[in-house]
Image (tube, rainbow, N blue to C red):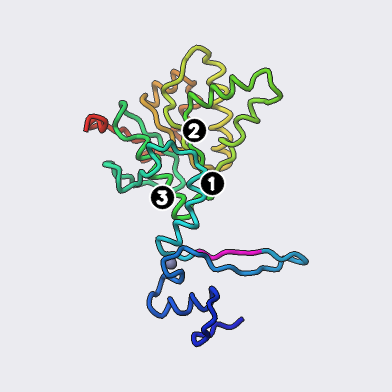
């Protein structure tokens, strides 16, 4: 169907044309409603959506993805702008954010994840507290689930946030080393971005989960991706 600016029917195409008269960028009139097209694929026909580039359009495009990440409610609204830290790294670089408790590591990780989703760098993301993941693996023993089944979501998501890596119990080093290796090695091989927050340095993490894992993290983070967050304890404010 040809676009006709004079046409008065309230369909998305007309709405788009009308709105474009006033604004170069927004066709949704601030509603966030996408344009819906019917696409033919061989014999099948399905709906395709084009989202507006305005704030409302981006929210309706990326909001549903964001809601699936599993960010704890306390951190849901964190953005890069709300973090006291400035991050200047490649979107595909891994990040290792370390420092004492309360320095804003998780907030910065969440802000960065939000940016990567909102600019379309990643199509899926998962937030995982490492101690909880290990509990889930332990709980799966004796059931019909393998390590790989439990780890699959963390391995396959475009962006993984491994929160609080340092707070794991060192009672079974070999097992921890193996679990972390399965995750990190697979994500490395498939070029999937990973953000790690930790209250230990990378050397200390090497002592905890093996230097093979620490080197992999170092390799993927490069010089700019290993960031120590110090300064004031934000929880005191
Ligand atoms: Zn719009």
Residue at 50% in and 27% down: 213
Whole-angstrom CA distance, mark 2 to mark 3, is: 18 Å
Whole-angstrom CA distance, mark 1 to mark 2, is: 13 Å
Residue at 45% in and 59% down: 58
Residue at 39% in and 45% down: 112
Which residue is at the far top? 171
Which image quadrant shows ligand 1?
bottom left
Q: Which mark is residue 115?
A: 3
Give the main secondary structure of the magenta stretch. Answer: strand
Which segment did they paint magenta? Answer: 47-51
237 relative to 124 in the view: left or right: left
Q: Is residue 67 above or below residue 12?
A: above
Examine the structure image and report whether residue 50 is included in the region drawn in magenta: yes
Residue 207 x, y percent position in the rendering: 44, 18
Of the two numbered discs 2 and 3 on the same chain, state the one appearing first in sequence: 3
Q: Nearer the viewer, residue 224 or 27?
A: 27
Residue at 71% in and 66% down: 45
Name the quadrant of the C terminus. top left
Residue at disc 1, secondary structure: loop
> How busy is the neighbourhood of tag 1: few (under 14 within 10 Å), some, or many (20 plus)?
some
Query: What is the quadrant of residue 30 in the picture?
Result: bottom left
Pointer 3 and pointer 1: residues touching (CB < 8 Å)? no
Whole-angstrom CA distance, mark 3 to mark 1, is: 12 Å
Q: Is residue 177 above or below residue 190?
A: above
Residue 222 x, y percent position in the rendering: 41, 39
Residue 19 x, y percent position in the rendering: 43, 76
Q: How many marks?
A: 3
Q: Which mark is residue 124?
A: 1
């Amino acid at each position: 169907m040809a676009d006709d600016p004079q046409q008065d029917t309230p369909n998305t195409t007309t709405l788009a044309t009308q709105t474009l008269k006033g604004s170069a960028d927004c066709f949704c009139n601030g509603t966030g409603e996408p344009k819906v097209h019917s696409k033919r694929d061989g014999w099948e026909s399905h709906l395709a959506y084009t989202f507006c580039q305005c704030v409302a359009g981006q929210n309706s495009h990326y909001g549903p993805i964001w809601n699936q990440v599993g960010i704890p409610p306390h951190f849901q609204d964190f953005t890069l702008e709300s973090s006291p830290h400035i991050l200047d790294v490649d979107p595909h670089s891994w990040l290792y954010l370390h420092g004492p408790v309360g320095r804003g590591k998780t907030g910065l990780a969440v802000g960065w994840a939000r940016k990567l989703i909102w600019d379309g760098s990643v199509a899926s993301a998962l937030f995982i507290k490492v101690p909880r993941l290990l509990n889930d693996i332990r709980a799966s023993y004796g059931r019909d689930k393998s390590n790989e089944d439990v780890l699959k979501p963390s391995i396959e998501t475009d962006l993984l946030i491994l929160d609080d890596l340092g707070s794991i119990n060192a009672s079974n080093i070999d097992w921890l080393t193996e679990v972390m290796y399965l995750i990190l090695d697979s994500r490395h091989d498939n070029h999937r971005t990973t953000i790690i927050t930790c209250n230990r340095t990378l050397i200390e993490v090497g002592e905890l989960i093996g230097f093979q894992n620490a080197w992999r993290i170092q390799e993927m983070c490069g010089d700019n991706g290993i960031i120590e967050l110090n300064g004031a304890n934000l929880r005191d404010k």
